[in-house]
């Protein structure tokens, strides 16, 4: 456990150094945030009545999505891990006195937290200061705020567990491109990052609720806005924990099988 905490700490400190990239990312996220808000505003003002999510809740959803983008995007990757696998330097990782799965898991968590730390607070502050109806509102209750923080943290753990499958697949394909495209595109869609899940057709919503992708973004953001009641949000925490246990356990098993087949050539 001490080794995992150490790599988490070192990766976090290293990630906090990329301030210029964070500023560029914030500008991009504000652009996309305003664009999505204006699209949905036009949609709601032109006959879209009795929608399952109000425009104000949708605006909160969009700003939270932009603020915590590093937490929820599956196409966010660690090129160093890919290089270790494809170059054969994975042999050095196998010499470490700790499990590779936990080592990489801690590393990926630190990478995302450092990226979010540099971006989320400025975006949230500016979004709160924007005039109505474009600004971010506060949670409807303290319970909703606490539940949001809890589901967001658990959602991050679930997302890292999902992303580990991308790295594991490279042991077989020797290229991350296919896995990134397939899991990234499907995950982004069924997480509600392209179309919010309440605005999807009913049959597509049922598919999204079966898959774990929405647990990292759709769930915490709708809890924050009040679109998901407190009782349903609390029940969803148990679903997050179950999915996390299943994904981590199966990921460890698959990684163990992949490592048994590894052949490192060289002199």
Image: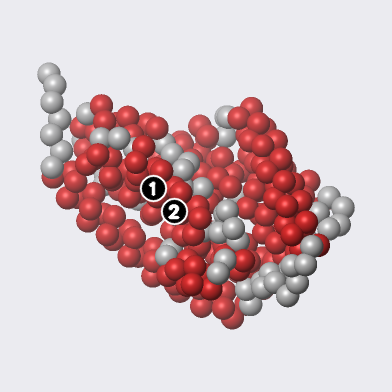
- Secondary structure of residue under mark 2: helix
Label 1 crowding class (10 Å Cα cut-off): few <14, some 14-19, many 20+?
A: few
| Of residues 97 and 86, the one drawn nearer to the viewer in this rendering | 86
Task: Tell me the residue at 70%/50% (across/down).
Answer: 36
Are circles 2 and 1 on residues that touch, CB within 8 Å? Answer: yes
Q: Quadrant of residue 20?
A: top right
Q: Circle 1 is placed at which residue position?
A: 182
Total count of labels: 2
Give the Cα distance between marks 2 and 1. 6 Å
Task: Tell me the residue at 32%/29% (across/down).
Answer: 83
Q: Outermost residue toward the front?
A: 47
Q: Outermost residue toward the bottom?
A: 231
Q: Quadrant of residue 196?
A: bottom right
Task: Tell me the residue at 51%/48% (across/down).
Answer: 73
- Secondary structure of residue under mark 1: helix
Q: Outermost residue toward the top?
A: 267
Residue 143: x percent and y percent? 67, 73
Q: Circle 2 is placed at which residue position?
A: 186
Q: Is residue 36 above or below residue 94?
A: below
User: Is residue 83 visible to the viewer in this orientation of the structure?
Assistant: yes
Label 2 crowding class (10 Å Cα cut-off): few <14, some 14-19, many 20+?
A: few
Task: Tell me the residue at 27%/59% (across/down).
Answer: 250
Q: Is residue 89 left or right of residue 119?
A: left
Residue 188: x percent and y percent? 50, 52
User: Is residue 5 visible to the viewer in this orientation of the structure?
Assistant: no
Residue 215: x percent and y percent? 50, 63
Q: Is residue 9 left or right of residue 55?
A: left
| Of residues 169 and 199, the one drawn nearer to the viewer in this rendering | 199
Q: Is residue 247 left or right of residue 262?
A: right
């Amino acid at each position: 456990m001490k080794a995992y905490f150490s790599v988490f700490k070192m990766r976090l400190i290293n990630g906090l150094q990329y301030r210029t990239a964070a500023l560029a990312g914030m500008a991009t996220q504000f652009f996309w945030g305003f664009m999505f808000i204006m699209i949905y505003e036009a949609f709601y003002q032109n006959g879209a009545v009795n929608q399952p999510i109000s425009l104000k809740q949708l605006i909160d959803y969009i700003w939270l999505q932009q603020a915590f983008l590093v937490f929820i995007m599956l196409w966010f990757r660690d090129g160093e891990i890919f290089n270790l696998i494809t170059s054969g330097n994975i042999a050095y990782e196998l010499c470490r006195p700790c499990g590779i799965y936990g080592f990489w898991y801690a590393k990926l968590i630190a990478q995302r937290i450092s990226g979010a730390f540099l971006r989320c607070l400025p975006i949230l502050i500016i979004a709160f200061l924007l005039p109505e109806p474009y600004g971010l509102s506060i949670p409807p209750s303290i319970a909703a705020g606490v539940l949001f923080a809890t589901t967001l943290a658990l959602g991050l753990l679930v997302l890292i567990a999902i992303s580990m499958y991308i790295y594991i697949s490279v042991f077989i394909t020797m290229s991350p491109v296919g896995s990134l495209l397939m899991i990234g595109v499907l995950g982004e869609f069924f997480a509600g990052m392209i179309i919010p899940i309440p605005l999807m057709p009913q049959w597509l919503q049922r598919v999204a609720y079966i898959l774990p992708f929405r647990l990292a973004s759709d769930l915490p953001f709708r809890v924050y806005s009040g679109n998901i009641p407190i009782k349903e949000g609390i029940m969803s925490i148990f679903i997050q924990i179950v999915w996390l246990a299943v994904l981590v356990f199966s990921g460890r098993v698959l990684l163990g099988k992949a490592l048994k087949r590894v052949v490192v050539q060289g002199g």
